[in-house]
Image (cartoon, helix red, strand yellow):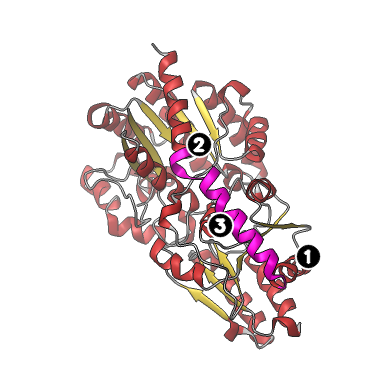
Amino acid sequence: MKIVNIVPGFGGTFYCGNCLRDSAFVASLRQAGHDASILPMYLPLQVGINTPDKDIPVFYGAVNIYLKQQFPFMRNMPSWLEKFFNSTPILKFAASKSSSTRATGLEEMTESMLLGKNGNQSHELQQLVDFLKHHEKPDIVHFSNALLLGMAEQIRNELNVPVVFSLQDEDVWVDVMSEKYKQRIWDLMAEKAAVVDAFIPVSNYFASVMKTKMRIPDAKLHILPIGIDPGKYQFSEPAKEPRAIGYLSRICEENGFGILVDAFIILKKDLRFKDLKLRVTGGKTGDDDHFISEQYRKLRENSISHDVEIFPEFTLEHLHKFFKSITLLSVPVLNGEAFGLYQLEALASGIPLVQPRLGAFPEIIESTGGGMIYESNTPQALSEALAEVLDSPSLLMQFSKSGHEAVLDTYDCRKVTLQMISIYQGLLNKRI
């Protein structure tokens, strides 16, 4: 089976769970004997593993589509200029700028993208369709998220193949938009969803969210969790001397880093946790600099900034060192999220979780037995949960063992991939 995965890139400046998910999935499809490839959009993937073949360009280059959206006269730019703006150095520069990775101010762009051939990116859409038709010739086209729905109808009609969309954290992008656009975008996504053959939400929680927001019929929903390759992670017992709280995600306000810092400050006032460290990785964007500086100000005021260490690199090789240095992991995302790949990476490494009762976090903790859920998502509540787990070696070991076993039993990407292949085959059989 020939499967093409269309995946938005992020440029490599921060930890992107969705990008890592898609890259690992393609590798697993190949191991299962299928011809699978990744087509990056907007920005290079830069995930360090399973990157696209060298002859595959970045489609819908972020700089080109921004310029064409904002300046109508640029929609007829010469091909040499278009190639320049789509070059790797220019796209990497764009990735380092905050506006490339946030929705605020890009509402019109999002709407135009969803309009497909009737939007300002019709030229880019036709380039993608032609490449798929003449170069890839897939049996299935699988999109990374539903913000790309504007491409579905033309690809499905011109290639005559099923189109599949994963569903993960689209609400994080849409729900921060201005009120003028928010419902308009959801309605447009619901309209475009009608031509899609199947949707793959990554959790029961998110299936419920997107079923309501996009009015997706049950028959098109196939809930399938994220999977990882456990063999790529090094299992070890949680760190004991010194004990350390870990954080793995983009270092930003939305992902709850401020809550974790405040909880750490509370814990350090307790003599039981005099030795406690906070170890952080996941990168950032330019938008996050002021927020991070504010967190360090609080740490300095409490004379504990020396107990915080930031790991600048977060490739798999560097994550091995990171996980061996921590006792547990907490990423207290303000509003929760659809899944959170970092949780599986931690559990596969023997590291327990402490997460808020938000989004899919309770679902994952319950299915793995790999950690503790707390509420509400405040520094005080988090500090109390962290203290309970950190102060109980038996609880730490129980969570470590249960979580690791659950990854092997339930979240092994090879098992998840077989389920996905079954869904693909069912879609193809309907067309015979």
Q: Is residue 300 above or below residue 119?
A: below
Q: Earlier in the sequence, mark 2 or mark 1?
A: 2
Q: Amino acid at mark 2?
A: Ser
Residues drawn in magenta: 391-415
Instruction: Give residue 350's position: percent from left, percent from top.
Output: 55, 61
Q: Main secondary structure of the magenta part?
A: helix
Q: Earlier in the sequence, mark 2 or mark 3?
A: 2
Q: Are marks 3 and 1 in contact (CB under 8 Å)?
A: no
Q: Amino acid at mark 1?
A: Ala
Marking on residue 145: none
Which residue is tagged 3?
A: 347
Query: Looking at the rendering, which quadrant does residue 189 occupy?
Result: top right
Which circle, 3 or 1, is nearer the viewer? 3
Q: Is residue 246 above or below residue 179?
A: below
Q: Earlier in the sequence, mark 3 or mark 1?
A: 3
Q: Amino acid at mark 3?
A: Leu
Compared across the picture, whether 307 is left or right of 392 comes to left
Which residue is tagged 2?
A: 166
